Structures are given as structure tokens and as C-alpha cells.
Image: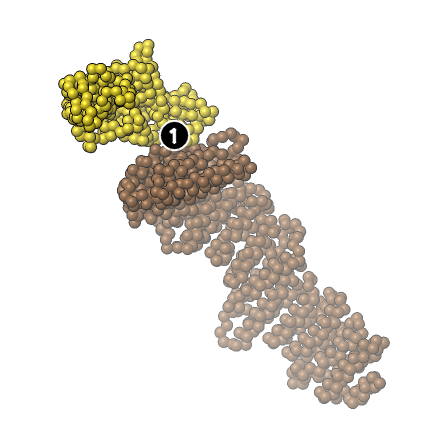
Chain colours: A brown, B yellow
Amino acid sequence: MSEAMARWLEEGKAVVKQQAFLMKRALDNTNLRDGLKYGSNMLCELRTGLLSPKNFYELYIMVADEMRHLEQYFLEEWKRGRRMVELYELVQHAGNIVPRLFLLITVGSVYIRSKEAPARDILKDLVEMCRGVQHPMRGLFLRNYLLQCARDKLPDIGSEYGSDVADGIDFLMHNFAEMNKLWVRMQHQGPVRDRERRERERLDLRILVGTNLVRLSNLEGIDADMYKTQVLPRILEQVISCKDQIAQQYLMEVIIQVFPDEFHLRTLEEFLATCPQLQSGVDVKAILVALMNRLAAFAKAEPAQIPSDVDMLAIFHSHVSKMTGSNTLELAASLDLQVALVNFALGFAPDRLDFVDQTLAVCAQLLQSNGETRLSGPAKHSTVQLLKTPLISNGQPLTILALPHYAGLMIYLPLESRSEVATLAVRMLLSSKTPVDSLLNFIQPLVKDVEEDGPNELDEEEMETEQNLIAALIHNFKSSDTDTQYAILVGARKHFGQGGPRRIKFTLVPMVVRALELAERVHEEEEGGGERAGTISAKKVFGFTLETIKGLASAEPVMALRLFLQASLIANKCGEDKIAYELVSQAFILYEDEVSDSKIQMELVLEAAGTLFLLNNLDPEDYDTLITNTTKHAARLLKKPDQCRAVYTCSHLFWNAGVKYEDGRTFQDGKRVLDCLQRSLKIADVCMQSSNNVNLFIEILDRYLYYYEAGNEKVTVKYIQVNQCSFS
Amino acid sequence: MDKLLSRASALVGLGPACTPSITFSDESSRKRVTSYKDGQQVLVFTDKDPVAGEVTLKLDPGKRLEHMGVKIEFIGMIEMFYGNYHEFTNLVRDLDAPGELTQTKVYQFDFASVDKQYDSYNGINVKLRYFLRVTVARQYSPNVVFEQDIWVKNVQTMPEINNSIKMEVGIEDCLHIEFEYNRSKYHLKDVVIGKIYFLLVRLKIKHMEIEIRKRESTGSGSDLYNESETITKFEIMDGAPVRGESVPVRLFLSGFDLTPTYRNVNNKFSVKYYLNLVLVDEEDRRYFKQQEITLWRKEL
């Protein structure tokens, strides 16, 4: 606001304040003549041409507020017996038109309340007389004042001021038409260089015009038929004939906003037929999108209200195709339209997935003819929206899996957008049951890298977040039928297997866990005997598990190794001794080939020993092979104390009451136990340079005592004494 | 002149004082208007109204007055402000034969069907008066003279032909408007209803107003003298219209000081009224079109 303008506004307000004061004082003394005089003086401030719309509005509000006192006075005059027609004439003697009309409207308002003349006639007169103000801004505010005063006095069903709603409509339409003309006219007055400012000012004033439509929508008496025949056609006629971009854009949007959905549903053809007639600068897309979104929301909220005799989808589809077919729209705009269409279709007819897919196919065509392999900018954004819409739309994200063209659209997105969509999909899907293959195809960006994308720039943390989601998803792959479950896992592994080293450590682990779970289930079914639904055997599931872990082996050997051990336990539990053997063997191969960190080696040897001790179903010979191997590795550990501990731990493997020969003998080889202990004792001896390692002897002594107690005849008192000597 | 002298003589005590006064027989039921003279209230008559009443010659007790006769005149007169008097009516009634007055005496008078076809009028350069003049003639002293004005208003019949005024005017390629007033003849409490259509607007119009103008013409031929006066300016449009707009006119005449239109009253003067439509552009240039309307009196 310029300094001069601020000053003008202040001056204007000062005058209004002063004259309003004088007016009220005169009215308090029931001096109508003076009251009108000061009132006129006050209103004369609204004749100014110096203020911008915002400042003028400020002044106008102040004046309108003061005018209520005058209105109140007129009302009292009437109660005192004054005939309203006299007052109505009296104020028309004012020489200046702006004050005169403000006064006339104020009296008119009381005149209507007095019911000395039909509201209809008074309103008609007022709206006609207001033509005298042709200055756009002053005219708009004057007519706004008229609207405000007439607000609660419009003829309408159930109104005390006349029950014929057509009169109310006529009044509002007339006022609307005039206001719109004034508003549009602003655009063409004044120098060209001020265009931008003028457009800004027009936007400031638009709500004044829109209020007419709001009032129309508030008329109780308008039903859908009347709207179709008497209201909408007249509004649209104005919209078209004004030939003004700003007005058309705004009014079309207001129509959508203010009138009820039921009306829109009945008048789609009329409304949409108007769109091609709008000025070229009008963003028809936004209008259609607004309408479709609104109807979609409505359809979702009140499906019962949808008329069955109108094929909404077809209507919109044809209009949207017409628009996208005309080649005037940018790609992003076309896509936005399709997004709205999809949204609309999903809201409107959730069962018409064919329609949605058809729309997606159109988009695919658009994108293909666009020629870019990876989208950017608004088109990218639109496509993301397009893909997200069916996901969020009706709480049934599975919908996308029934859309053959859906996944195909993904490839046009750059990686980060694909991930965005995929992440959303996974979130939506987490609680759902879903055909795994299409799903994974779809969430592919999370599952594997594709060459076209170049190197994946995700940092570890993001990757972890994403992949944790996937892991969570995997845990949701559930089927009550074991065969299906197996098929799901096989299908899933096909996808995850291609995920590259950074992903599989997140994805394959849960896969293995699930597979093992399945194996147990299958085994239980097998054990249970009787009818089995599935044909799959536990063996096969273990085979699958083995393969899966192998897949992980190169990327995460330690993890894979542990999984092997884990799996072997389950296999043992299921009585699959050969498989358990194979799994442990695989673990050893991995250990030998891939594990070089001595600390981890130590951990793994201990874990292996722990695992083997529990594999009670193994054939004793196999068992023997494995434990011998373990002991060998134990003895080869890098650090002497580790060797020592590992070896004495391994001694337990040779004293395993769980493993039995066919003839019932237990696998308890006292001699080899003693060998181990002796060996570890020897190693401990070597370690004694460091006093820290003294506990080794204690630990070893513990073993001796244990075996002595456990009845290992090879471990005699002699050894225990020797050990004691070592301390001394 | 007579009046001045009579006052002077009364002051110096010359000759016995007698104070004439007039009361009208239907005084209480008559309307009054404020006279142009001294702001006094005067009674309103119409053409056919009889002018009747009483003349009272008030004499102080114990005084006596010799006179050469008492008469009353009814005079209709047009006064020009440049000093020209013209009596168009003069009726005389003798009230008393020469004799002596010893006490207050009351005379009846009655101008039953005196012609009052013209309205009283008080303009800029011309005045039309009706008045009664009582004269007590004396032989050696100045006559005692007393005058009493009345105000004549005549109600006219509704004009039989009363067309609307419709006209298209303009400046080529600049401004074309068509205006329409619902009538050409309006009574004094009437409303001018009209409409202005804009057929072409290439001017930056700021506002538009209607003026009521009054033109008083006196004299004739080479002595014709016109005096114009703007009774009111009434804004009827704010801002600049575009082609195709129409703007309503509604002008209540009742608030203004208007008389009926007078044409060639006794060949001495005329009073005419005009509606002047004025458009003002942003450079304050004025474009106007003046149109005569006839005003008439419908009721008193």
C-alpha cells in the first residue's frame, strides 16, 4: 500500500467516523432530515476513486456497519406509523447516486420487512436501480451491499417474504449478471501496463461476485429439476458470454463448490458441454478435476444417491478423451485429468476396474508417445499421482494387482519416484493378502536394481528403512494351504534373488525363516497322518531353504552360515537327518571358504558345536564326521586361548547321550573326550605367558570334574590332580 | 406612494387615522402559501373562487373622518423588474358614498366571478400579482390606501396527449446514446422515469446527471430577455458504461421549487422547463442534450 493511499484511507475513515457520529446523534433526537444529511455525507466517502479494492473494502465495511444504525432507525420510524413508501421516495431525492442507492437499499430492506409491498417488487426495483453505478469497484460493492441486505429476505419456499423461489432466483441471477459484467469490465479499463495489478485487484474482488452463487445455492426451494432448467443454464450463459478467462475459471469452480452433488449429477452434460466453449486460457483441466474429485468423494460417502440411469463414467471419459485428444494440453495436464478420472471411477464404480485399467492404458500410450524413458518435472509428479490414486482411493490397494497396465507405467518413473510409489503400496499392502508375483513385480524398485536407473544412490539408512518394510511384507506372505504357501515363497524368491547384495541380506533372511516355518508345518501334517491337503513334502521345503541360503552365501556368508545351522536344527527336529547333515556340511564349506575374521570364526565354531550337540537324529557316523570336522576347526583357531576353549567345548560333542547307534548305544566316546581335554590343557600351558589366561586351567578343570562325575571312565582322579598341580 | 403618504400623515398627526383591514369570508378553510413579500402567509385562490369578505375601517374612539367615498379594487398585475407595470384586471366596487365616518365601520364586498386565469408568479425578472386595494378618498388629505395580496393557483386538466420523449443523440464515432423519458408533460408532484441506452461509448465518461433547468423569457421581439436557472443537478450514473448498458432514471419532482410551464402570459412573459442530460468525461468536458418538458398543476 502506497503512502498516499494509506493517507487517503485514513482521511476517508476519519470523515466516516465523524459523519457517522453526527448521524447517530441526529437520529437519537429523531431528526430524520439531519440524520439523512449526515448519512449521505458519510456515504459520499464511498465515491472515492483513489483506493485499491482492499482499502476500499475496509472503508466499505466501516460504512456498512454504521448503516445498520440508520436501518434500525427506519424500522423504528415504520413502527411509529410512517409509511415505508414515503421513506422510499424521500431518500431518492439525494443528489449523488452512490449515497442515494446505498440509502435506497437500506430503506428497501426495511420496506421488505414491513411487508407493505411485495419483496419481489422491491428487490426488482433495487437491483434495477443499481445499474446507475457503472464504476466496476463501486458497483460491485454497492451490489454486494444489496445482497447483504437482501440476504434473509429472499422469496423462497418457507420464507415469509414470498414463497415463489423463482422470484428469489430472478433477483440473484440479475444481480449476478450485473456484477459479473462489472467485474469483467475491470479488465479492460485503464492502461495496458497496469494489467497485472488489475488482475490482482480482480482476484481480490471475485468473492463479491461468487457470493451471488452462494446465495443461490442457499435457496431452499431450488430442487434438482429447477436447477437444471432455470438456474444452471442462466449461470452458464453468463459464464460463456462474458468471454473472460479469470471470470470463467473462477465461476466454473464456484459452481462446482457451492451447489450440491445431487445437482451436479443431474447436470453433468450441460456443465461439461460448456467447458469447450470457455476461453483458451481457462484451465479446463482444473475444473474437470475439481468436479470429478467432488463427485468421487460423494459417491464414496453416499453410494445410494447415485442415479442409476446416467453413465457417469462414459460421460467423463468421452469429455476427457476429447480434451486429451485435442493435443492442446501439456502431458502433465493430460495426466492430471486421467488421475482425476481414475479417482472418479474408483470412487464412483469401484467394481469397474476395467475402466480404470483402460484409463491407465491411455496414460501408457501418452507416456509412450512422449518418448522419454524416465519422466521428470510435473509429468513425473502427475504419474506418481496416477499410480498412487488407486492405492489410496478406496482402502483396497489390491486393486492395482487387477490392473494389467499398472505396473507397466512404473517404468517411466525415475527410481526415487518408483520407490515412493512402491513404498506406499507396501504400506497399504502390509495388512492384506495378495498375489505375490504381481505385487513384487510392482514393488520391483524396492526389490532389485534395473540397469536404466544407473547406480542407486540411496544411503544405507534409507535402504534399511525400505528393506525393513519388505521384510515385514515377507512375514505377511501367508496362506493356510501349504502348497500355496510354498508357491508364494518360490515366486517371491525369484524376485528377491535378483535384488543384489545390498538387498538380499534384508529380504532372504525372512524368506528362510518363513520357509523353515513352512517346513515344520508340513512335517507336522505329515506326522499327523490322515488326509493332507498339500502334496508338498518337508524335504522339498528344506531343499528350497538350502537353495535360498546358498543365494545369500556370497553376500552374507556369516549370516548364511548361521541360517544353515538354524535350518539344520529344524531339519533335525523334523527327522530329516540327511538334510540336517547336508546343511551343516554347507555351513562348514562356507566357514572354510568365506570366514576369515578370527573373532567370528571363534563364535561360529562355538555355535556349530552347540548346534551339533542338539542334532540328535543324525546317523552316528555322519555325526562323527561333523564333530571331528568341528574339532579340527576348533584346534585351528588363530588365538591360543580361543583354541583352548573351543577344543574343550568340542569335547562335549564326543559325550552326547542324545545321539544313539541303531543298537541303542549312546555316542559317548570317553577316550576322545580325554584327547580333547588333554589337547586343550596343552594349549593352555602355552598360553601361560599372560596371567590373564589362568582361568583357562580352571575352566578345563571344570570339564574334567564334569566328565568324572558323568562317569567317563577315561577321566580318572589322576588327571584331576595333575590339573590341580598346574596351579601350584 | 399613497401608502407612504398615509403613513406619514398618521405619524405627524395630520388628519384622523383610520386603519383598513380585509378579512375573507372563507379564510379559515383556505390554504396559505408564504408570500414573496415579507414572508407573510397569503391565502390561495383558484380561478373560479369568489373573492369575498369584509373590509373594516377601524377608527380610534372619538375620532372622525371625512371622506370622498370608499372603494375596493381587485387588481391583477404583471410587474417587470425593470419597472414596468401592467394591470390586466381591475374591478372596482364602491363601498361607501362620500360622507363622514365616526366609528369603525365594516363593509361587505364580493368579487363573485372575477377572472383569475393566470397563476401568481414570482420570478427573476417578472412578477404576477393579484391583490385587493381599499381606498378611502379624501378631499384635502392623501387618500388612505390598503393593499392585500392573494395567491392564485390554477389546477389544470390532465393533458390529453402526453407522449414519451425518445431521442437518439451522439457525436459521430464517439458517443451514441438513446434516451427516453416516459412523458413530455409532468405534473408538479410527478416522477420522471426514463432510461438512457448507450449505443456507442468511446469516451471515458466519469458520470452523468440530469439537470432541471428553468427559462424565464420576458418582453418580446428585440426586447426579449431570457433568464435561465438550474433548479437541480441530479446524478444518475457513476462511472463509465460500455456499449449495451442502460441506466435508469427516476427523478421525483416534488422536492423542487417548480411552477407549471407558462406560455406567453398576457403576451408579457413565459416560463419553460427543460431536462438537460449531461455527460461528463474524465477531462471534465460536458456533453449535453436539453429537452423541454411541460409542467402542469394537477392539484393544489
Please name the residue shown 59% across and 70% down the image: A516
Name the residue tied to disc 1.
B235
Q: Residue at x 25, y 20 (%)?
A: B14
Decide if residue B156 is in sight here. no
Q: Amino acid at mark 1?
A: Glu
Quadrant of the drawing holding the C terminus of chain A: bottom right
Q: Which quarter of the picture shows residue A693?
A: bottom right
Q: Residues within 10 Å of mark 1 (few under 14, many from 20)?
A: many
Q: Nearer the viewer, residue B89 or A269?
A: B89
Q: Is residue B252 left or right of residue B46?
A: right
Farthest bottom residue in view: A717
The residue sitting at the front extreme is: B62
Q: Give whichever of A190, A543 is nearer the camera.
A: A190
| Depth check, front residue: B118 or A62 | B118
Is B268 situated left or right of B197 in this image?
Answer: left
Residue A619 in percent (x, y) is at 66, 78
> In the rendered image of this protein, does residue B46 appear above or below residue A644?
above
Provide residue A183's location: percent of width, then percent of height: 44, 36
Which chain is home to disc 1? B
**Residue drawn 48% across and 54% down?**
A393
Work out which quarter of the rendered image holds the N terminus of chain A and state it. top right
> What percent of the width, then of the height, locates residue A335?
51, 45
Q: Position of residue A681 (x, y in %)?
A: 80, 80
Is residue A662 in view?
A: yes
Say which residue appears at 58% left-offset and 63% top-offset.
Answer: A472
In this view of the protein, which residue sits in the foreground, A24 or B251?
A: A24
Give the answer, above or below, for where A57 lies relative to A671. Answer: above
Q: Is residue A514 above or below residue B247?
A: below
